[in-house]
Amino acid sequence: MTLFVLLIGLLLGLLTGSFLNVVVHRLPRMIEAAWEADQAAWQAERQGLPAPAPGPRYDLAQPPSHCPSCHTRIRWYQLIPLLSWLWLRGRCAHCSQRISVRYPLVELLTAGFGGWCAWRYGLTPAALLWFSFACLLLVIALIDWDTTYLPDSLSLSLLALGLLGSSLG
């Protein structure tokens, strides 16, 4: 049973790691876009003009994943955590531009978090809380490394997790 629980934790970690890469890449850009939109709205209001129209949708789901170099949409089978990066030898399938080794490293690290939490706590709420805590810390550290931002939404989520974990004992 322990091996099964460990495999579930590893798989959950790989899948989560892939999503965390998206968060690390897009959340700072979303924050900057919101700042720019607020600034433009403030300027328009100050000048008595109508607020500018919002730009194209950009969030964690849209636009679909694409190569940052050639902007080719990445197909579903090229998004399989860790395996796709190895299969493509760390390069874009369309333009052969290098894909950062950070993507599979984040997936591996998150798989390690998931495996350790599942092995240590089993499939329990405590395992999920510790896994969530580790993932949030990783995302905050990577965003801070890249941009020196510490997004409030992530920091406050850590606070909420701490309070929830504390209340559960």
Image (spheres, rainbow, N blue to C red):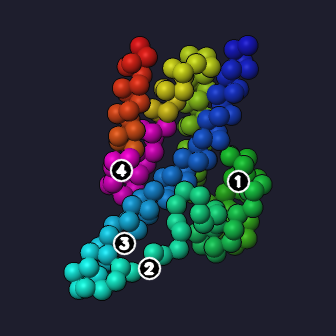
Tell me the crowding category of disc 1: few under 14, some 14 to 19, or many 20 or more residues within 10 angstroms, Cα based.
Answer: some
Residue 37 is marked as 3
Callout 1–callout 2 Cβ contact below 8 Å: no
N-terminal of the pair, mark 3 or mark 2, is 3
> Which residues fall within the magenta stretch?
135-153
Q: Quadrant of the C terminus?
A: top left
N-terminal of the pair, mark 2 or mark 4, is 2
| Picture quadrant where residue 157 is located | top left
Q: Quadrant of the N terminus?
A: top right
Callout 4–callout 1 Cβ contact below 8 Å: no
**Residue 99 placement (x, y as % from top left):** 61, 60
**Residue 80 placement (x, y as % from top left):** 72, 49
Residue 168 visible (yes or no):
yes
Callout 3–callout 1 Cβ contact below 8 Å: no
Q: Which residue is mark 2?
A: 53
Identify the element where label 1 is drawn. Answer: loop
Select label 4 or label 1 by which is in front: 4
Callout 3–callout 2 Cβ contact below 8 Å: no
Q: Is residue 104 above or below residue 50?
A: above
Residue 147 is marked as none
Identify the element where label 3 is drawn. Answer: helix
The residues bearing labels 3 and 4 have C-alpha atoms spaced at a distance of 17 Å
Is 143 in front, or is 163?
A: 163
Residue at image location 26% in from the left, 79% down from the top: 45
Q: Which residue is mark 4?
A: 151
Residue at image location 64% in from the left, 28% down from the top: 9
| Picture quadrant where residue 123 is located | top right
Q: Which residue is mark 1?
A: 79
Is 138 in front, or is 28?
A: 28
Identify the element where label 4 is drawn. Answer: loop
